[in-house]
Image (cartoon, grey):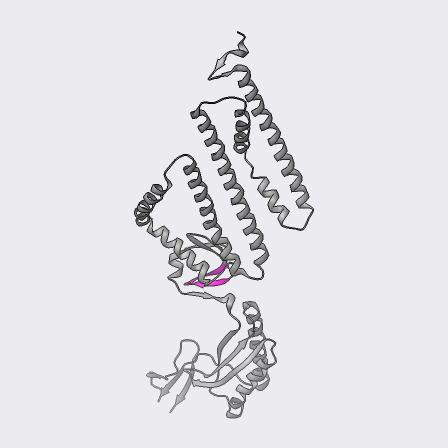
Amino acid sequence: MSLFQTNFLGNSLQDWLLAAGMAVVVYSVLTFMFKRVARRFSRFAATTETRIDNIVAEILGKTRWFFILGIALFAGGKYVTLPPAGESLLRNIVIFTTLIQTGLWATQLLASWIRESVERKMAEDAASATTMTAMSFLGRVLIWSVVLLLALDNMGVNITALVTGLGIGGVAVALAIQNILGDLFASLSIVLDKPFVIGDFIIVNEYLGTVEYIGLKTTRIRSLSGEQVIFSNSDLLKSRIRNFKRMQQRRVVFSIGITYQTPFEKLSRVAGMIRSIIEVQPLARFDRAHFKEYGDSSLVFEIVYHVGSADFNTYMDIQQHINLEIYRRFEDEGIDFAYPTRTVYLHNGSQDAVASPKEKTSGFRISKEN
């Protein structure tokens, strides 16, 4: 009897060599084909403007060696006769590797589709883009949960009992990680209720900045000074949030004070003068200007107007033009801006001094009475 006819596990050495050779050939051919097709498809996708071919190229790039090895072992196993335990093992290997590879393809399909959708919708609907980004995690969890259950089912595990046990154990785990779950549900609340979305400028307590990322546990904001501020989602929803991105117009209130020595004729013209200054400003809508009160050291006017833009720089440009024009007009009219003063009265040359109710800390005026 020759060596090639020697029996190993019910098959001759020649059969085993033939099976191994077939497995090597299948593995080599499929590896070469997948790499070549993926490389060529990637080059083709780079020359087109469609998005579908880009997604297909990314999916092909996720093909892993263990999937090809499973196919090769299955092909080689056809040339030998295996015992029932061996056939079961080979079948489980093929099924397991196929399920994992299917999960990788499905995950990449989901990630590519969400990325393309977010890039397309970010400019026109940031809220939808935020929702899709957050929901991608739930999609991945669902995909791998199905893969795991199918794998266990094919391996003979009782899934019904497993799911029941996981439900009971899940209660204990939920109690142990309730803080994490609180942030998770807060994240879902942000996604569904949309108090803010990626790209919004918000103020939370004393922190302000642009929303960069909304995750399952934290939300990240890029502040005006450049650093990244990270909030826990559950803490964030407990705070008062001011969303300036959704401001349609800005209401501006400011005051000016003029001296008590201003003549009545000039005083009565101040409100109309300020109104004419504001009405000529672009994007500014005048509301009111009133002589509000007698202040400690000035006659106080309160002015209110609206800016038809939420942009802060636009508001500051308009306010600057108004301030400069008020200064110029007051200078032409001879109207003086008030500043804190102190009046001290000296009686009969005595050193006792009585301060007026208008007393302030900067500047003073002395008048002597005999």
Magenta range: 200-210
Please name whichever residue, 267 or 15, is drawn nearer the observer in this view of the structure.
Answer: 15
298 vs 285, nearest the viewer: 285
- Figure quadrant of residue 349: bottom left
Classified by dominant secondary structure, the portion drawn in magenta counts as strand
Please tell me which residue lies in front, 318 or 367. 318
Q: Is residue 20 left or right of residue 182?
A: right
User: Is residue 240 in the magenta section?
Assistant: no
Provide residue 145's location: percent of width, then percent of height: 43, 44
In magenta segment, residue 206:
yes
Q: Position of residue 291 (x, y in %)?
A: 47, 86
Where 151 falls versus 53 (above or below)? above
Which residue is farthest top?
1
Return the x and y of residue 185 as percentages of the image width and height: 39, 55
x 51%, y 11%: residue = 6
Residue 15 position by quadrant: top right
Tell which residue pokes out farthest to the right in this image. 47
Q: How many numbered dots are placed on residues in this image? A: 0
- At horizontal 64% and vertical 37% (from top left) the residue drawn is 37
Q: Relative to residue 24, is residue 273 depicted above or below? A: below
* Rendering coords of residue 39 (x, y %): 64, 38
Q: Quadrant of the C terminus?
A: bottom left
Could one spot residue 199 in this view of the protein?
Answer: no
Can see residue 321? yes
